[in-house]
Image (cartoon, rainbow, N blue to C red):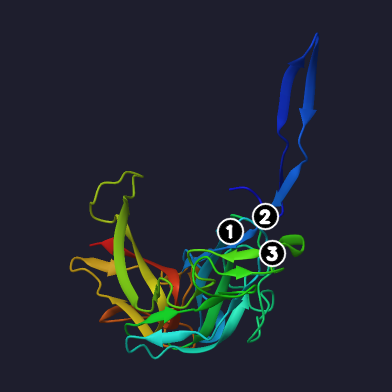
Amino acid sequence: MTPAGTTISNVARIEYSLGAGAVLRSSNRVDIRVGEIIDFSVTPAPACGRATAAGVVAVGFRITNLGNGPEAFMPGSPIVTGGSNFVASGVVADSNGNGCYDPGVDQPIPFGGKTPPLAPGQSFIVFVIGTGGNGLGQVILPVTSETGAGARGTAVPGGGQDGGDAVIGDSGGVVENPAPVPGGLAASLVKSQSVRAPDGSAEPRRGAVITYRIEGSFAGTGVASDVAIADAIPAGTTYVPASLTLDGAALSDAADDDRGQYDAAGVAVRLGDVAAPALRAITFQVRIN
């Protein structure tokens, strides 16, 4: 796509013979400046993989400039549909460009505010932040071009790069109903094991220690409340005291202030509120009787 503001020039020539000589003449030059096309898309941004603190949920949207000149874009008021209890509190720019919401680093975009100017083909991520998010639902973020909106082909005199004209493209200068970001949350567990016998082998014999690993995966967006994971001690084995861990950190076996506990029913770990996306890992050991 030819960049906005580019000047396209053209000069015609005529060449002929007159008597014994050749004559070459040129026409006047005609110039035309390429107008700026206002076009863009809004799509869900990839999940960052980082849970946020204090139960804050961040839903990302990627704004991509599909036009041929630099353009800034203005996020509108987020819309939540589908029965989710997600309550949006604002829109935040991905100020450091890492694709993740970083409280205190990423700066709010006030209502009527805009993104930095994006070069043709450049993308910029913004986050709708809020609380809640249990249950199914969708988050929609309307976005408008700073230059304006209108029917495809509408001219905006002087609205383009370097004072040239702008032309509204396929998006109409506004994306009122972009592809929504799913607001649901899905949790799953994956359990694995490894065996180490007294002789150093992996034979499951008497005295061998089995290390169990449970990975809890929380996908989508939202907050899972009061999460607890429990596992019974298998018959024919005995729990190895003080072997319970969460994300590599040791937990006590007693029912005290930390998140872990071991009793006759087995092991249990209380995760509390977990903001998706997140991955939590629990390990514990038993000895074969």
Residue nearer the viewer, 130 or 69: 69
In this view, 33 is above or below 91:
above
- Residue 158, x across and y down, in percent: 72, 68
From the viewer's perspective, is the residue at label 3 or at label 1 nearer? 3
Amino acid residing under circle 1: Gly
Horizontal side, residue 109 vs residue 189: left or right: right
- Residue 218, x across and y down, in percent: 38, 72
Q: Residue furthest front?
A: 19
For label 3, count other residues whose C-alpha is less than 10 Å away and answer few (under 14), some (14-19) or many (20+).
many
Q: CA distance from mark 3 to mark 1?
A: 11 Å
- Residue 209, x across and y down, in percent: 32, 57
Of labels 1 and 2, earlier in sequence is 2
Q: CA distance from mark 1 to mark 2?
A: 9 Å
For label 2, count other residues whose C-alpha is less than 10 Å away and answer few (under 14), some (14-19) or many (20+).
many
Secondary structure beneath label 3: loop
Label 2 with label 3: CB-CB less than 8 Å:
yes
Give the residue at mark 3.
160
Q: Residue 11 occupies which quadrant of the picture?
A: top right
